[in-house]
Amino acid sequence: MRIIAGSRKGARIFAPKGLDTRPTGDRAREAAFNLIGPVDGAHVLDLFAGSGAMGLEALSRGAEDVVFVEADREACRTIDRNLEKLRLHARVLCHDVARFLAAEPGTYNLVFCDPPYDQFARIRDRLARHLPKLLTPQGLLVLETSSREPEPDLSLPLRTSRRYGAARITLFEL
């Protein structure tokens, strides 16, 4: 995996070992950022962050700050390693995403949400309840789900939904 664009373009990043984390591939990440557009100065939240690839890409492209939320300790260590390697600064919270969302931790211009594919149906209602509160006006939510699943509905205005291999990238705009 590598950073696609921005100040750290071409830099390779680490992914957590094992099968518990499924990093967003380069192709799907590039396509997502083409759909998102410029992120200069954005305040970003990366939920179910895994390797941190989406948030790292946002930092490389000019985001002001990123908060990474990930429950898996090995994945949190991997994000820290990537931040150190790329000489970037961000907050890494090793927390359960559901508990983090329930705490209503502020608002963000851009939220990435990439839950484990097999858990999305179980947590969809909780995400639909909490995610809109996290977005600033004109804020953007980028949700990654399995391409095998139908287009997700989170009761937010849909901007677009596209499939890239095993991933479906859906953008919602407040």
Image (cartoon, grey):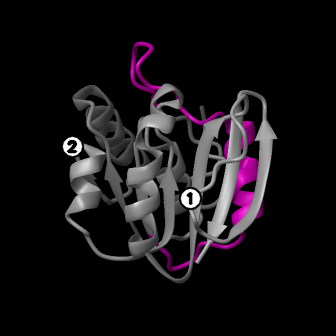
Left or right for 104, reference 59: left
Q: Which residues are magenta?
A: 14-43
- The type of residue carrying mark 1 is Leu
Rendered image: mark on residue 77? none
Height in image: 87 above or below 77?
Answer: below
What amino acid is at disc 2?
Cys
Q: Cα distance, mark 1 to mark 2?
A: 25 Å
User: Residue 15 lies in what quarter of the image?
Assistant: top left
Q: Nearer the viewer, mark 1 or mark 2?
A: 1
Q: Is residue 114 left or right of residue 104?
A: right
Determine which quarter of the picture holds residue 3. Answer: top right
Residue 123, image x, y percentages: 41, 42
- The answer, for residue 44, to whether it is visible in the render is yes
Q: In the picture shown, does residue 132 fall above or below 29?
A: below
Considering depth in this image, is 126 or 78 the residue closer to the camera?
Answer: 126
- Quarter of the image with the C terminus is bottom right
Residue 5 visible in the snapshot: no
Q: Tell whether position 20 is magenta.
A: yes
Instruction: Name the N-terminal-most of marks 1 and 2.
Output: 2
In terms of depth relative to the viewer, which is nearer, 165 or 1?
165
139 part of magenta stretch: no
Q: Position of residue 95 (x, y in %)?
A: 21, 45
The label shown at residue 94 is 2
In the image, 123 versus 106, the foreground residue is 123
Q: Position of residue 103 (x, y in %)?
A: 19, 64
Asked if residue 4 lies left or right of residue 119, the reply is right
Q: Main secondary structure of the magenta part?
A: loop
Q: Secondary structure at mark 2?
A: loop
Secondary structure beneath disc 1? loop
Residue that numbered label 1 is attached to: 154
Quadrant into which the N terminus falls: top right
